[in-house]
Amino acid sequence: MNFKIIIPVLLIVLFGIAALISLHDTPTTITKNQDPIKISVDSWPVSGHLFVAEQKGFFEKNNVKVELSLMQDIPNFHSQYTTGDADAIMAVYADGIFYDAVFVPSNVVYVTDMITTADFLVGNVDSIAELKGKTIGVTEMNSFSHLFVLELLSQEGLDSDDVNLILIPSSEVINKIKDGTIDAGHSWNIDVRESAQSLNYNILAEAKDASGIISDVMIFKSSTIDSRPNDVSAIITSYGEAIDYCKLNYEECLSIISENIGWSEEEINENFNSIVAFDVNDNIQIMQDSHESFSLFGSGEIIAKQYVALKQINQIPNFDEFVAKHFVLGLDQ
């Protein structure tokens, strides 16, 4: 028997088995070495609960690495997600529909809140009907701001052909009404509302008057959901834990959120009073297939029809696929 041949062959076989075992075990160790999930965060108070989750150690407790990237500049905020390296984004639902249809396959995994009075249309006229033939400011074309104004106009039998829409930052609305650039504009700035009252301008409508158009959501790239579903679930869990923590430690959370997003504690408190925040049970209801505007399906259809009319998307999305409700359903078990 030629042991010089048999021994090397045995070694090769043993090394092969060891390699197969190593490959089989790889998925159990890969999570520890994966890059953190990068979330693009807007400077909106409800999104600040992510910073609470980070600071109070909820991400670490749930074994997920997260990198939060606050973006104050709206175009960069969007592009960091649509063409950049962000895996997720805290955004308005309407913008999420647009991301998915135009830029990158995406899914809504959680609804953080619905706006009631925080967003508003202010003007130097007495009613929306009087805006026919006049100029209205929106923060971005083909955005939730654009759709909000279009929905309000449609309720008065008007459309985009009946008005002149131009881009005006939310913070500049009052100044642009004063100098005659616009007759009305969409804003969410608290100081804009206060200035409007002092100048006797009218709040023509609020977000609640276009129910479902302005709700805030957590959106993930579909590729991230497919490759790291456990981490996505852990982030949603951590966010929920931050919400629960803040219910019991409200003042501390105001301070944490203020430090991270640059709003005063007074502004954040006032903002929280102008929205309806949602927990897991609320999300289960919101994610049900319904034509009601409270549902992501009902409001999504309204939003998508506006986008189709604007020729920004080709068809109504399949909301059964776009709304990844299995995550919140899993948390409820």
Image: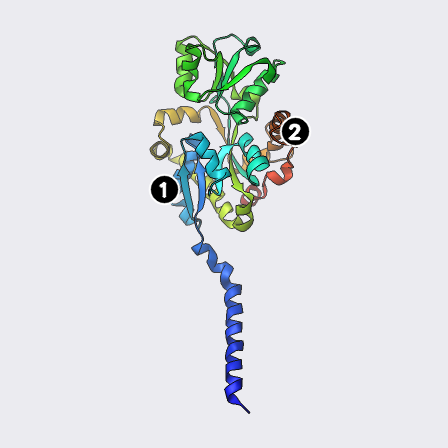
Q: Secondary structure at mark 2?
A: loop
Residue 28 on image: x %, y %: 49, 59
In which quarter of the view is residue 133 placed? top right
Three-letter amino acid code at disc 1? Gln
Q: Secondary structure at mark 1?
A: helix
Residue 277 on image: x %, y %: 49, 31
- Label located before the other in sequence (2 or 1): 1
In the rendered image, which quarter contains the N terminus? bottom right
Taking the view exactly as shown, the residue that stands out farthest to the bottom is: 1
Residue 95 on image: x %, y %: 53, 31
CA neighbours of label 2 inside 10 A, class few (<14), some (14 to 19), many (20+):
some
Residue 47 left/right relative to 162? left
In which quarter of the view is residue 188 placed? top left
Tell me the colour scheme of the image: rainbow
| Foreground pick, 14 / 163 | 163
| Foreground pick, 52 / 77 | 77
Is residue 284 visible in the rendered structure shown here? no
Q: How many marks?
A: 2
Q: Residue at x 56, y 40 (%)?
A: 106
Separation of marks 2 and 1 at Cα, in angstroms: 39 Å
CA neighbours of label 1 inside 10 A, class few (<14), some (14 to 19), many (20+):
few
- Residue occupied by mark 2: 291
Q: Residue at x 35, y 27 (%)?
A: 265
Is residue 210 visible in the rendered structure shown here? yes
| Foreground pick, 57 / 76 | 76
Three-letter amino acid code at disc 2? His
- Residue occupied by mark 1: 55
Compared to residue 151, the image places residue 1 above or below, namely below
In the rendered image, which quarter contains the C terminus? top right
